[in-house]
Amino acid sequence: MTNTESKVAIKFRFDLKSFLCFLLIFVIEVIIALFVKDSIIRPYGGDVLVVILMYYFFKTFVKMNPLPLAIGVLFFAYAVEIGQYFNLVEVLNMQDNRIMRIVIGSSFSWGDMLCYTLGAIICLFLDRKEMKAITQ
């Protein structure tokens, strides 16, 4: 492999620390969804946390460089948001399914895209020691 080529190395594993982070964030997300009825934490905090939640879910099962992992999760979040722009729930004929409306969402927002980006940046900040070890 030449210097201009890059290889994303993925190893499958189970990382308990990442799984516990995932579970903690999941519980926080559920608490926000059930009990927080404001105009800041629920819509924006939840969107920041969902990217971190997905990051730690995938990090539980794969060992790879944090940067491509964070970018992959971020692009997935972007794809879901773009699906909202194109009314994916209706296209899939699931508009009467409450769970799918919550998971996929039903309204596009540039603010959500910004929150997802912030969530990915937080993931990289949290894994900065791992990033430094990989680049050295």
Image (cartoon, rainbow, N blue to C red):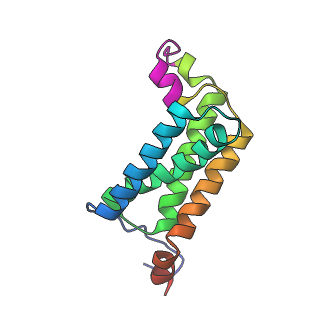
Report x, y in % for residue 66: 48, 67
Whether residue 12 is situated above or below residue 45 in the rendered picture: below
Between 121 and 38, the one lying in front of the other is 38
Whether residue 3 is situated above or below residue 55 in the rendered picture: below
Report x, y in % for residue 112: 67, 41
Between 134 and 46, the one lying in front of the other is 46
On the picture, is 75 further left or further right than 107? left
Whether residue 123 is situated above or below residue 94 in the rendered picture: below
On the picture, is 88 further left or further right than 113? left
Q: Residue 2: tell me if it is visible.
A: no
Point 42% across, 44% down: residue: 27
Residues drawn in magenta: 92-103
Is 88 magenta? The answer is: no
Report x, y in % for residue 62: 34, 60
Quadrant, the N terminus = bottom left
Point 56% across, 36% down: residue: 80
